């Protein structure tokens, strides 16, 4: 990539979505390191965030019986804080933000919990639309083998419904087949993000 393409770049907001175990963390980290090593200042972040609400939320998720409504409000409150404190300031500095999970996680997961999809969309109306959303798509049975067991939402039926809920918004996503090898997936991601950023 040329000096010119680096200096012309303004802040961009890239989001990774997908069910638990689809490889978001692994690939977001490697991709962010690749961008940084190519001179593109990149903030790698995630939701639930490392802020106060995010920390409280992780603790709260251990209560496996909590309701979808409460979960949606907490995830969305965390998002409001995360946007104000981290995402928007980094974009103003001209950085690329790579974020694991964002509003489509709330829309897909909390719909699976029984909440009304339109209510969830409305609740998240304040949340700036990302510039690029990559959906890491994977069979839930394969994803479950890859992820830590016992987390609140990690059950085959739950993740199968959540994958379908994500697909209702497929128009908003660039979909990546996450069943391929780690190297193949990362290569495809670099191509997609490289094209997107005109690198
Ligand atoms: P996860 O990405 O697994 O975080 P960590 O790897 O730090 O444990 O997120 C925790 C769980 O929360 C995961 O099962 C997805 C779920 N989740 C929602 O249900 N709604 C949301 O809005 C978000 C951000 C996450």
Image (spheres, rainbow, N blue to C red):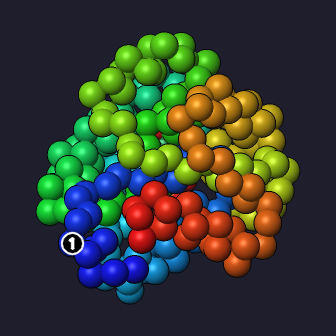
Q: Is residue 83 above or below residue 164?
A: below
Residue furthest to the right in view is 141
Where does residue 189 sit, x and y in percent of width and height?
59, 65
Count residues near mark 1 (Cα–Cα under 10 Å), then give few for <14, some for 14-19, many for 20+: few
Tell me if residue 70 comes above or below residue 45 in the rendering: above
Q: Is residue 181 left or right of residue 150?
A: right
Task: Determine the secondary structure under disc 1.
Answer: helix
Report the quarter where the N terminus lies.
Answer: bottom left
Horizontal and vertical percent position of residue 34 = 46, 80
x then y, percent, for residue 75? 39, 38
Residue linked to disc 1: 7
Judged left or right of residue 66, residue 140 is: right
Most distant residue in the bottom direction: 37
Q: Is residue 117 visible?
A: yes
Q: In which quadrant is the C terminus drawn?
A: bottom left
Camera-side residue of 60 and 53 = 53
Left or right of 64 on screen, residue 75: left
Q: Residue at x 45, y 48 (%)?
A: 132
Quarter of the image for residue 149 reads bottom right
Of residues 189 and 162, which is closer to you in this image? 189
Residue sitting at x 26%, y 48%: 82
Q: Is residue 62 visible?
A: no
Q: Nearer the viewer, residue 196 or 46?
A: 196
| Residue that appears at 31% across and 55% down | 12
Query: Looking at the picture, does residue 139 appear above or below residue 118?
Result: below
Determine whether, in the image, residue 175 is placed left or right of residue 131.
right
Q: Is mark 1 within 8 Å of ligand 1?
A: no
- Number of numbered tags placed on the structure image: 1
| Quadrant position of residue 94 | bottom left
Residue at x 26%, y 75% (from the top left corner) = 4
Q: Position of residue 58 (x, y in %)?
A: 43, 50
């Amino acid at each position: 990539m040329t000096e010119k393409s680096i200096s012309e770049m303004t802040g961009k907001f890239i989001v990774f979505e997908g069910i638990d175990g689809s490889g978001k963390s692994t690939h977001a980290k490697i991709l962010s390191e690749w961008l940084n090593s190519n001179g593109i200042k990149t903030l790698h972040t995630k939701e639930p965030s490392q802020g106060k609400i995010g920390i409280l939320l992780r603790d709260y998720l251990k209560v496996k019986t909590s309701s979808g409504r409460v979960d949606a409000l907490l995830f969305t409150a965390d998002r409001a804080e995360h946007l104000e404190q981290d995402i928007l300031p980094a974009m103003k500095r001209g950085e690329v933000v790579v974020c694991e999970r964002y509003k489509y996680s709330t829309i897909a997961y909390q719909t699976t919990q029984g909440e009304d999809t339109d209510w969830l969309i409305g609740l998240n109306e304040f949340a700036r639309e990302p510039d690029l959303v990559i959906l890491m798509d994977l069979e839930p049975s394969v994803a479950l083998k890859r992820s830590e067991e016992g987390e609140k939402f990690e059950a085959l039926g739950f993740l199968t419904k959540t994958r379908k809920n994500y697909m209702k918004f497929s128009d908003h996503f660039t979909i990546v087949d996450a069943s391929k090898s780690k190297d193949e997936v990362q290569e495809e991601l670099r191509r997609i993000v490289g094209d997107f950023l005109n690198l």
